[in-house]
Amino acid sequence: MRRFGLVAVASLALVAGAHGSAAKVDVLAKIKVGAQPCSVAMASGSAWATVFADDQVVRIDPATNNVVKRIAVNGGPCGITFGAASLWLMNFGTSTVQRIDPATERVTATIQVGTQPYDIAYGFGSVWVTNYGDGTLFRVDPAKNRVVRRIRIGGGPRGARDLALGSVGRKSLAGFGDAH
């Protein structure tokens, strides 16, 4: 169902591999972050990992490979992204998106979204959240810390392949459900 089994280091290796060549990626460190790490984002010189079973976001210092901060968040955090000078994470268990200020390491906003949020991305000045349970895509305005658009796309939109942000001559957004 979700990426519960992934370890933070695997996500970091995928990020590193995506920016490099198709050559093998060496694991440099295994970092214990907690029970069921789910996703990682890079921001403010740190790696930030969501830990689903512990309801935490952890800050990892890449120079020392140590967890330097644990931040309590709503139930079932998984997807995480960076944009508008903030970290944004979706919480599967509480159907919320939370905003974290990396400078203060504190949750600064909690926003109710659709049923069973599945993934999150930042693009075109907004936070975008797919909601598996109700077949929607929500647009969150960072300036207002609230949902400004609810788009019914049907099916059960899932992860990154279902939330595509791109630009072809103009701003465009596509969210897809099970139909494709």
Image: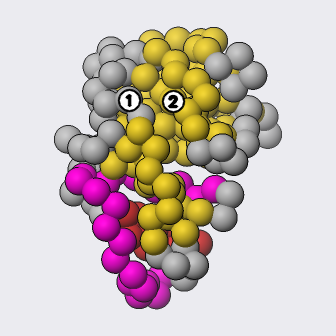
Amino acid marked by disc 1: Asn
Residue positioned most to the right? 169
Mark 2: secondary structure: strand
Quick check: marks 2 and 1 in contact, CB under 8 Å? yes
* Horizontal side, residue 35 vs residue 163: left or right: left
Q: Residue at x 45, y 64 (%)?
A: 67
Identify which residue is drawn at 58% across, 38% down. Answer: 106
Magenta stretch, residue numbers: 22-43
Q: Which of the pair 106/21 is nearer the observer?
A: 106
Q: In which quadrant is the N terminus drawn?
A: top left
- Which element type, helix, strand or loop, lies under badge 1? loop
Q: Is residue 106 magenta?
A: no
Inter-mark Cα distance, 2 to 1: 8 Å
Taking the image as drawn, is residue 180 in sight?
A: no
Query: Does residue 28 show up magenta in the picture?
Result: yes
**Is there any visible trace of residue 70 in the rendered image?**
yes
What crowding class fits label 2: few (fewer than 14 Cα within 10 Å), some (14-19), or many (20 or more)? many
Quarter of the image that includes the C terminus: top left
Question: Which x, y percent locates residue 25?
Answer: 43, 84
For this view, does 75 lie left or right of residue 47? Answer: left
Left or right, 16 with respect to 79, comes to right
Q: Which residue is mark 1?
A: 74
**Residue 24 horizontal/vertical position (percent):** 41, 87
